[in-house]
Image (cartoon, helix red, strand yellow):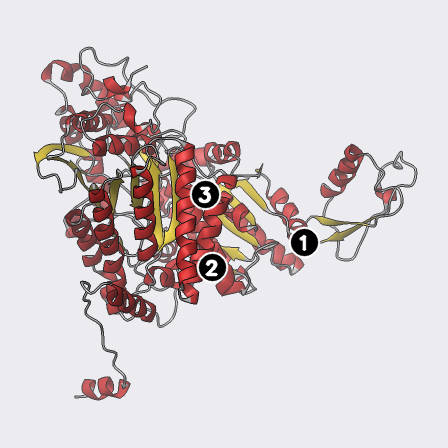
């Protein structure tokens, strides 16, 4: 097994590692993309000197033929890939060691969706395009000084360039393709050639923290959906149906348990489903639709506590319960007594058991995460069948987290085929596969539309589901709506948009010591900061968000959310982010925290992403399709002290549909780190709030005005509303 020292020594060439590389059996792999042009082979071989090219060429050519991309499997490191304590990395700077810590976390098999293909999440969100890039990057980081910056072009380490101590140590761009060529078809060609890659959001910026990030986002989304659609704070007994248990979507099962509802999540990939079950994030697993429905509408056991029931042995009571749970559903109002058994109970004084058909888990307000191994379309259609035959709608809330941004290359599997059949057809006949995907999308929307006629509410989770459904010809049109609106809202438009407008978004940090005790200290600091802010007085809407996040932090350890690095996420506004950063930096200075802490956020945030079908879908001044905010954010973070910055094409809703960026900021306990945090975090939030204010959002207007009052150096252009619509009407008649 390799060591970290060996990992930082450059590409292993003499001797070459092992035998010709092949994907490992028994672990998930990215689907094949189909064979590309031979130029890809030339591009791959330029990483290697001439004396090994003859050996590697046929091996890489075979990868091209089989997988449509050269991953260089031979060079997959023989090391336990995980986030090691920062002091173990052989580096000249703390920043470089912290970046290594983050990179290896993104490739940890417990974290990454397809680690051998360097895919962290989202089906195709990569850290690097091939393993040679990984080796070179680790080598450069080990040599980098405080007066150098490492430049990354779509996974390729261009090199170390002279810079200043105040400059970022790392600048990343992913997928920066000329706009006229930023189509899905062009992406597949360019990716096959190895000249660009899809970094998703935090995969290619080295800031992924495992599914915890999306757990928290899903928790807040479902809580706020219940407030908006159902008018409730308590989700006990409510049913949430969705799909996806792979990368980020794997968080849905855990989120359902945390909010206290019944979550039924469909997943076609058995390996992904079993991974979440073994983690304990998924409570039950079944491949039976009957069992799914049974758990929602099995008989409720109304046990009349007749003499003798309490005295039954626990094991026998369990047998009795199990017997009735496995009965076929009864008609409303019917019951079975002990005579329903094939033979009398061998217990004197057996109780009378009344069996009332109902939604078992719902009636008992049971907290449940149930994984269905099968296609979500089949699940939606079965729910429609139950509604049409019994008159009962078994679901309250619904969404979808398939990787629909990449529907024809493994992001969405058609209901007409099994998982293995779909993977085969995807590679052998892409055109037929595409037709089946689009037919499946139409069927899924048809089922959702039928359920939505009842008291059921559906939203798009920003994965391009409704966009791809529209392209497939599904009935998702909203009459009289703009280009970014559909029959169902995106979760930004109805649920999270106002949160972004108030400056709240997914702020996160990573304790590079790898010590859970350090994380516990940061949890306590963050909760205390938010509690102090409430005590000082905040608006009711802000207080509600703070309270949700205090609850999240206080319960985080109990929910065992850490997968991979010792990281935490919460949604905070500008004031909260700065205060938490300052508190953590001071704790490092006084050694309450043993090693530096990396601050970051999801790109899916207030300012980081221009995405007309997700993050900026609630911007209605026509600028939703403009990307100035995300690009300015990337540049502004670099100017104000970020340790590293990243700018990506694609992420969430897909290639060519979004521009997004992120950052990493190292806190090392120094006054300089505190100053960088104050400047950079303030800009990182205010940029987006100011843009949302200018677009006409009233909440953003209020927040940016308040921020200007608190900081005289901030001067933002404020919009003037057209108060009299007749002014427009009269002018346009000229």
Q: Which residue is mark 2?
A: 224
Mark 3 closeness class: few <14, some 14–19, many ≥20 residues within 10 Å: many
| Count of numbered labels shown in the rendering | 3
Q: Are marks 1 and 3 in contact (CB under 8 Å)?
A: no
Q: Which residue is mark 1?
A: 363
In this view, 708 is above or below 269: below
Looking at the image, which is closer to me, 496 or 426? 496
Q: Secondary structure at mark 1?
A: helix
Residue depicted at 84% across the width and 48% down the height: 305
Nearer-N-terminus badge (1/3): 3
In this view, 38 is above or below 191: above
| Residue 594 appears in view | yes
- Give the left or right position of residue 362, taking residue 404 as reference: right
Q: Are marks 1 and 2 in contact (CB under 8 Å)?
A: no
Question: Residue lying farthest front?
Answer: 590
Q: In the rendering, at what x and y percent does residue 505 appear?
A: 35, 54
């Amino acid at each position: 097994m390799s060591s970290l020292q060996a990992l930082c020594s450059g590409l292993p060439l003499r001797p070459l590692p092992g035998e010709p590389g092949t994907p490992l059996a028994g672990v998930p792999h990215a689907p094949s993309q189909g064979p590309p042009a031979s130029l890809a082979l030339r591009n791959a071989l330029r990483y290697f000197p001439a004396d090994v090219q003859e050996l590697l060429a046929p091996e890489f050519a075979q990868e091209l033929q089989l997988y449509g991309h050269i991953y260089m499997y031979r060079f997959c490191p023989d090391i336990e890939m995980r986030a090691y304590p920062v002091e173990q990395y052989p580096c000249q700077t703390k920043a470089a060691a912290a970046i290594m810590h983050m990179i290896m976390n993104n490739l940890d098999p417990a974290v990454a969706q397809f680690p051998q293909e360097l895919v962290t999440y989202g089906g195709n969100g990569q850290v690097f395009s091939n393993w040679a890039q990984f080796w070179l990057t680790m080598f450069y980081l080990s040599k980098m000084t405080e007066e150098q910056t490492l430049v990354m072009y779509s996974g390729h380490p261009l090199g170390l360039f002279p810079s200043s101590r105040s400059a970022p140590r790392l600048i990343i761009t992913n997928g920066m393709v000329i706009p006229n060529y930023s189509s899905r078809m062009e992406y597949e060609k360019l990716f096959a050639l190895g000249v660009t890659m899809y970094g998703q959001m935090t995969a290619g910026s080295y800031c992924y923290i495992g599914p915890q990030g999306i757990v928290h986002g899903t928790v807040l989304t479902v809580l706020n959906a219940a407030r908006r659609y159902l008018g409730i704070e308590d989700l006990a007994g409510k049913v949430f149906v969705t799909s996806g248990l792979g990368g980020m979507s794997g968080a849905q099962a855990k989120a359902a348990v945390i909010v206290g509802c019944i979550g039924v999540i469909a997943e076609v990939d058995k390996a992904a489903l079993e991974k979440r079950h073994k983690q304990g994030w998924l409570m039950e697993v079944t491949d039976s639709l009957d069992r799914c429905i049974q758990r929602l509408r099995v008989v409720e056991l109304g046990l009349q506590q007749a003499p003798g029931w309490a005295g039954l042995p626990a094991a026998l009571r369990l047998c009795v319960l199990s017997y009735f749970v496995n009965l076929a559903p009864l008609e409303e109002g019917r019951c079975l007594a002990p005579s329903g058994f094939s033979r009398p109970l061998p217990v004197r004084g057996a109780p009378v058991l009344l069996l009332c058909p109902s939604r078992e888990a719902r009636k008992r307000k049971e907290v449940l995460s149930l994984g269905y191994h099968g296609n979500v379309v089949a699940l939606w259609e079965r729910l429609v069948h139950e509604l049409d035959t019994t008159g009962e709608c078994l679901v309250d809330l619904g969404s979808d987290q398939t990787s629909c941004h990449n529907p024809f290359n493994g992001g969405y599997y058609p209901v007409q085929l099994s998982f293995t059949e779909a993977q085969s057809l995807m590679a052998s006949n892409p055109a037929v596969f595409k037709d089946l995907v689009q037919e499946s999308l139409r069927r899924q929307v048809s089922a959702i539309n039928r359920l939505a006629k009842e008291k059921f509410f559906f939203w798009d989770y920003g994965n391009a589901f409704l966009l791809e459904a529209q392209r497939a010809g599904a009935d998702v049109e909203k009459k009289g709506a703009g280009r970014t609106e559909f029959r169902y809202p995106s979760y930004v438009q109805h649920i999270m948009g106002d949160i972004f407008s108030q400056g709240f978004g997914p702020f996160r940090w990573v304790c590079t010591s790898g010590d859970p005790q350090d994380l516990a200290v940061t949890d306590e600091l963050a909760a205390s900061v938010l509690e102090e802010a409430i005590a000082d007085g905040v608006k009711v809407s802000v207080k509600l968000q703070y309270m949700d996040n205090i609850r999240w932090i206080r319960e985080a350890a109990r929910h065992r959310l850490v997968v991979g690095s010792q990281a935490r996420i919460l949604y905070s506004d500008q004031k909260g982010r700065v205060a938490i950063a300052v508190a953590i930096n001071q704790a490092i200075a006084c050694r309450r925290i043993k090693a530096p802490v990396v601050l970051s956020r999801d790109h899916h945030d207030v300012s980081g992403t221009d995405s007309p079908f997700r993050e900026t879908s609630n911007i209605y001044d026509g600028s939703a399709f403009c990307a100035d905010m995300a690009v300015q954010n990337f540049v502004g973070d670099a100017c104000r002290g970020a340790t590293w910055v990243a700018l990506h094409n694609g992420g969430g809703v897909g290639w060519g549909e979004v521009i997004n960026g992120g950052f990493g900021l190292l806190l090392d306990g120094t006054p300089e780190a505190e100053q960088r945090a104050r400047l950079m975090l303030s800009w990182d939030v205010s940029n987006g709030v100011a843009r949302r204010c200018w677009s006409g959002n009233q909440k953003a207007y209020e927040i940016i005005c308040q921020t200007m009052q608190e900081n005289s150096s901030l001067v933002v252009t404020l919009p003037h509303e057209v108060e009299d619509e007749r002014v427009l009407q009269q002018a346009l008649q000229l």
